[in-house]
Amino acid sequence: MITLTHVGKQYDRIHIALSDVSFAVEPGEFIFLTGPSGAGKSTLLKLILREQVPSSGEIVVAGHRLASMPAKEIPYLRRKLGVVFQDFKLIRTMTIFENVAFVLRILGVPFMEQKQRAFRALKLVGLQHKLSSYPLQLSGGEQQRVAIARALVNDPLVLLADEPTGNLDPDLAAEIMALFERINVQGTTVLVATHDRSLIQKMRKRVLGLERGRLAFDQPAPASTVVV
């Protein structure tokens, strides 16, 4: 689903964000990307989203070779990706329905289908009753769930999340992670960037660790313990 081969990203002679990073993400995996601030987590997600291009190496996402991808093909790549940010990025002057359906409207999806798909995505996150509300009428946890619904409304193959629980208390963070796990069980590949080690330990998933732009470790998910 996602393959990075000797990927580097250098902004100038001094600022090297990533150096010789290689790993593969299989379809249906749930992976945490961790490391201290400045380790390169956000840069790596931007490369996968093709907001930036690598300075060296190769990135392949859902069959697309990103380094050589023409600009006209980028929208087709992004239709396969859902993205969740730490600060939600909801449009305050739009209703919850309008926020979730925004991508569908841009793609020219008929209005009735927009309504059906937005309702389905909001039902998945338990907020189908908030269609007519506005972002500032919701709690922080509810806004994050709306952002997740927006990321899922186009049925992406991959869900990317950049510090999605950074502004939430531990209980809400656990709730959001449980939601991601349900989404993953339904077949969506999930890649979550976070520095929250306690959250990672609770989830027991594969973990990729970045340090100073390099892949420091690739820790597989712990084997399930079966009690007989």
Image (cartoon, rainbow, N blue to C red):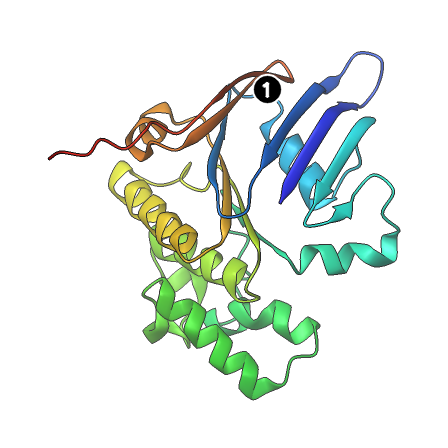
> Can the viewer see residue 139?
yes
Q: How many marks?
A: 1
Q: Position of residue 106 (x, y in %)?
A: 69, 72
| Quadrant of image for the C terminus | top left
Q: Position of residue 134 (x, y in %)?
A: 44, 68
User: In the orientation shown, which residue stands out farthest toward the front?
Assistant: 228
- Give the residue at x 49% y 48%: 28
Seen in the picture, residue 190 relative to 124 is either above or below; the reply is above
Q: Position of residue 173 (x, y in %)?
A: 32, 41
Q: Nearer the viewer, residue 96 or 22?
A: 22
- Give the residue at x 86% y 53%: 71
Judging by the rendered image, the residue that carries numbered circle 1 is 39
Neighbours of disc 1 within 10 Å: few (<14), some (14-19), many (20+): some
Seen in the picture, residue 62 relative to 173 is either above or below; the reply is below
Helix, strand, or loop for circle 1? loop
- Give the residue at x 45% y 42%: 164
Seen in the picture, residue 204 relative to 78 is either above or below; the reply is above
> Can the viewer see residue 87?
no
Q: Say which quarter of the image contains residue 74.
A: bottom right
Seen in the picture, residue 110 relative to 191 is either above or below; the reply is below
- Give the residue at x 77% y 38%: 52
Asked if residue 204 lies left or right of residue 26, the reply is: left
Q: Position of residue 55 (x, y in %)?
A: 83, 26
Q: Nearer the viewer, residue 159 or 46?
A: 159
Residue type indicated by callout 1 = Ala
User: In the orientation shown, which residue stands out farthest toward the left?
Assistant: 228
| Quadrant of image for the N terminus | top right
Asked if residue 183 lies left or right of residue 61, the reply is: left
Asked if residue 210 lies left or right of residue 32, the reply is: right
